[in-house]
Amino acid sequence: MITSLPASTRIYLLQCVAAIALSVCPARCQTAPVYSNPRAPLEARVSDLLGRLSQDEKLSLLTGGSFCASNAIPRLGVGALRMLGAGQGAGGSTGPESAGRATLFPAAITQASTWEPDLAWRIGKAMGDETLNKTTGWQVLLGPAMNVMRSPLCGRNGEYFGEDPYLASRLAVSVIEGTQSTGCAACAKHYAANNEEVDRGSVDVRVSERTLREIYLPAFEASTREAHVWSVMASYNKVNGYHSTANKYLLTDILKDDWGWDGVVMSDWGAVHEVNRVINAGCDLEMPGPGFLTPPAIRIAMDSGAVKQEAIDSNVRRILRAMIRTGLANPVPRKVDNSVLNSAQNQKLTFDVASRGIVLLKNDGHLLPLDASKVHSIAIIGPAAAHMQYGAAGSPDVKPYYSINPIEGISRRAGKDVKIEVVEGLTPGPNAHGDEKSYAEAAAAAARADVAIVLASTMYEEGEGRDRSSMDLPAGQADLINAVAAANKNTIVVLNNGAPVTLTPWLKNVPALLDAWFPGQEGGHALAAILFGDINPSGKLPCTFGARREDYPDYGNFPGTKGIVKYPEGIYVGYRHFDKNRIDPVYPFGYGLSYTTFAYSNLRFSKPALAARGRVNALVDIANTGKRKGAEVVELYVRDPAPRVDRPVRELKGFAKIDLAPGQKGTVSIPLSGRSLAFCDVPGKCWRAYKGAYEIEVGASSRDLRLRAKLKLAANYAEPVAHMGQAPPPPERLADMEKRLKLVDLAKGCPATASTQEKKDTTPSAAFDGDDSTYWSSAFKDPQWLQVDLGKPTMVGGVGIDWTIAYSTTYRIQTSMDGAQWKDVYSTTQGQGEVEILHFKPVSARYVRFYGEKRASKWGHAFYTFAVYGR
Ligand code: BGC
C-alpha cells in the first residue's frame, strides 16, 4: 500500500515514523543509523550513508529526478534536493512545482552598487528563509551568480555583481553565508567565464590562466574557501576547449583540489552533453534529469572501463553531503512556515537595499533632492514609469506579492497637493517606440510641470539567453529625453537597467541622473525616497560607464567568431582597461554622488610594515562636511609602482561604507594581506608579491583618489597553488588531426544529400564546405542519414566527424557503389561526440553515408564536418 504513494509522501511518512521512534524511545537513539543522526559528525554521516547504498541507488543519484530536484533515496528516507531559481529571491520560474510568490529583492547589480556586504548577508539570509518555507519547502537556492561583467552587452549582467572580482567576491561571500546560515544551500554559479548569452551552450572561451585566476575565478575561490558554499554550478560554455561540465581542470584540479572544496558540483540546466568525461571531470550531479547520466548509460561506461567505481563513489559522496547538510537525512522533517514569505522585515530589507543601491550620477545646481514644499507639479514620463523592470529577467524571476512602480512611489511621497501627470512618451503596444507625436505629448506635459522625471529602461533587451545588440537605450528613448529636457530645465533621468547604457546623446542636456538598476518590489518607494531626500543616495557604480561601445575591452571580441571567443584583453577588464588605455569614462567604476560631502584624511596603517604572512589595516578618517546625514563608500586601490610583470594601474582590494551625521567624523579600517598585493605567477605556480613599497590609494571612486600612502611589504610573498599552469591544451580540431596524421579529406566540396535538415542554413553541404563553423543538422527525429557522392569509385578507409553538441550515440558508417545498396563499415552504440576519426577496412565505394539511429540530445544529428579518407 505504502509503495503506491508518491516518493515524496513515502519519505515524509518514513521521516515521521523515525521521528516518533526517536521521541518515544530515547534508548533507541543509540541504534538510529549514524547518517540520520544530526549530532554525528558530517563525514561519519556521509560515509555511513554511502556504505548503505546499493549500486543502483548510487547510479540513480548522478542525474536529476525532475526539472528542479535531484533523485531521492526513498528506501532510507532521504529526500531529494529541491532547487529554486535565485539571485533576487526564492525564485518562481524553475518549474511548475516552484510556482508561488516570494519577496522580490533588488537584483545582484543593485546589491553590488550598495557596496555593503552586510546588506548582502541579510538578503542571503532572507532568501534562504523564504526558500526553506516556500510552498512545501525547498533546500537549494541556485545562486548567487558571480560572473564578472566583461562586456556591457552580456544579457545577464544584471544578475551579476559588476566588473571587479574583489567587489564580486565580497558580495558573493556574504550572500552565501547569509543563505547557508539558515540551513539552505547556496550555489555559486556559473563556473566559469560564462560572460555571454547568445551562444552560451557551445561557445569556447579562450582565456589565459592568469586572467582566469585574477579576474574570472576569485569570486568562486572566495565562495569556496571563505564561505564554504555547499554547491557550485558548472556553466554552459566551454573554457579553453572543454565544456565546463567536462572540464577536469576547472572542476577537480582547481575547484576541488587547489581550493580544497568539499561541496557538490551540479551542471547548469542541460549543460551536460556526454557521460564519461563528465563523471571523470567531477561534475557530480547532472541537472535537470533524467539526462545523460542515467544508470544504463553509466553501466555501459563502467563496463568499457571508461568510468571507474571510485569516480562514482566520489561524486555520490558529494551529493550525499549536500543532502545531509540541508537536513534531508534528519529524522525530523523541517517544519514549513509560509508566513515567513514577504514578511514586513523582508519588505523593509528590499526597500533598504534598493535605496542604498540607487546611484546618483549627476546633480547640477542641486536640483535634487526635490523640495516637497516647492514642487507643485511633476510630469512622470517614460516606459519604466508604469512598467518598471524590478529584477533581472530569466531564471532568477520571482513573482512578488506586490510591487511599487515609480508612478505609485512618487505620487504617494509627493502627496495629493502635487499634480502628477503621466505620459509614456512612446507609442503604445508591444513594439513600443518613439515618434514625433509621442515626444510632443511628453514635452508638453514636461513644459506644464515644475519637474519632469524620465524613467528610461533597457526594456527587457537584457536577460538570460540574449545579449543586447547595442548599448543604446532602445525605442528612441534618447530622443524622448532630449525632447523633455528641451521643454523643462528641471529634467531628471532615472535609468532602469542591469548594465551600462550610452549616455552621451543626451547627458549634457539634463541636470540630474540616477541609476535605479533593477531595484526589487519596493523600487518605486525607494526611488521616491531618494528623489525627495528622505534617503541620501550612497550607491556607487560596480561597473564603468564608458562613452562608447568601442571603449570597452571586449569590443571586437564579443561574442566571438566560429564558436570561439578570445579574451585578448586578458586581465584588463572594466576599469583596469580604461586606466591602462587612458580612456576617459563618462562615469568611472566606483563613482556615485551624495547630497552631502565627505572629507578624507589621515591615511595610515596599523603597523609600519606588512609581514609576508601577516595582516595590516589601512585606516582613514572620513568627515561628513555637508548638511545632511549620509553614507560614503571608501575605496582602497593597490598599485605596484615598480611592477616586474605587466600589472594593472590600480586594483580594488578593499572598501568600507560609513554612515555619518552632519559634522560627524569617523574612521574606517580596511584589512590588507600579502594576497591583496599579489599577482598570479603562472610559471612560478603561485600568487606572488615581491617585497618592497606598494602604493595604497584611497578615494571616492577609481578616478577620484584623495589620499595616497606607501605600504611596505617586509618580505617576498608566495602562496603556492598545486595545479597552477597545468591546464591541458585545448583538444585537437579535426583539421589539426588530419594534418598530424597526413589525412586528405576526399569529400570536401562533394555533392551531398540528407534525409532532412533542421533549418534553412543547416544544409547537407555545410558539412563538406571546409568551414568548421557551418554545420549540418537533421530534424529532431531518429533515424536520419546524410550521404556524400565522391564522383567515382574510390578506395576509402576512414571518416572524420567534427560533432556539434547535438551528436549521435548510435550510428553507422556505410558505403555504396550505386547509392542504393549500402554496406556497414563501422557502427557504434556509444558515441561520445566531440571530434572522431574512425578507421575501417578499406573498401571501394562511390558513396559514403552516415546513418544515425539514436541522438544524444533532444536536438538532431549534427556535425560541422564530415570527412572521408582514402586508404
Ligand atoms: C540558468 C541557471 C539557472 C538554471 C535553473 C539555467 O538556464 O543558466 O542560472 O540556475 O537555469 O533555473
Image (spheres, rainbow, N blue to C red):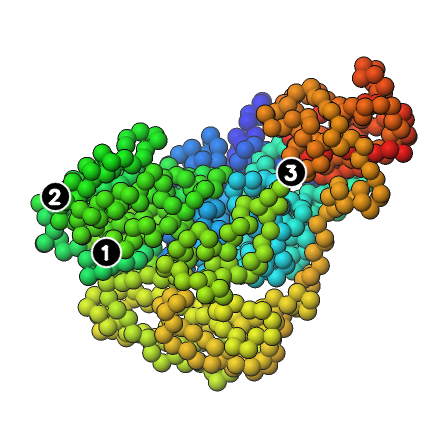
Q: Quadrant of residue 92?
A: top left
Q: Position of residue 305 (x, y in %)?
A: 81, 41
Farthest-out residue, bottom:
608
Q: Position of residue 642 (x, y in %)?
A: 55, 78
Residue for badge 3: 773
Kind of residue at disc 3: Ser
Marks 1 and 2 sit apart, C-alpha to C-alpha, by: 18 Å
Q: Give the mark nearer the N terminus: 3 vs 2.
A: 2
Q: Quadrant of residue 7?
A: top right
Q: Is residue 369 left or right of residue 713?
A: left
- Disc 2 secondary structure class: helix
Q: Residue at x 35, y 65 (%)?
A: 633
Judge: label 1 CB < 8 Å from ligand 1: no
Mark 3–mark 1 CB contact (< 8 Å): no
Of the 4 image quadrants, the one containing the N terminus is top right
Of the 4 image quadrants, the one containing the C terminus is top right
Q: Position of residue 394 (x, y in %)?
A: 45, 38
Is there any visible trace of residue 724 in the rendered image?
yes
Marks 3 and 1 sit apart, C-alpha to C-alpha, by: 49 Å
Q: Is residue 107 above or below residue 600?
A: above
Q: Residue at x 71, y 39 (%)?
A: 834
Marks 3 and 2 sit apart, C-alpha to C-alpha, by: 57 Å
Instruction: Identify which residue, 267 or 433, lies in the foreground.
Output: 433
Q: Give the mark nearer the N terminus: 1 vs 2.
A: 2
Q: Give the mark nearer the N terminus: 3 vs 1.
A: 1
Q: Is residue 126 left or right of residue 766?
A: left
Kind of residue at disc 1: Pro
Residue for badge 2: 448
Check residue 511 in the rendering and tell me which mark sits there, or answer none.
1
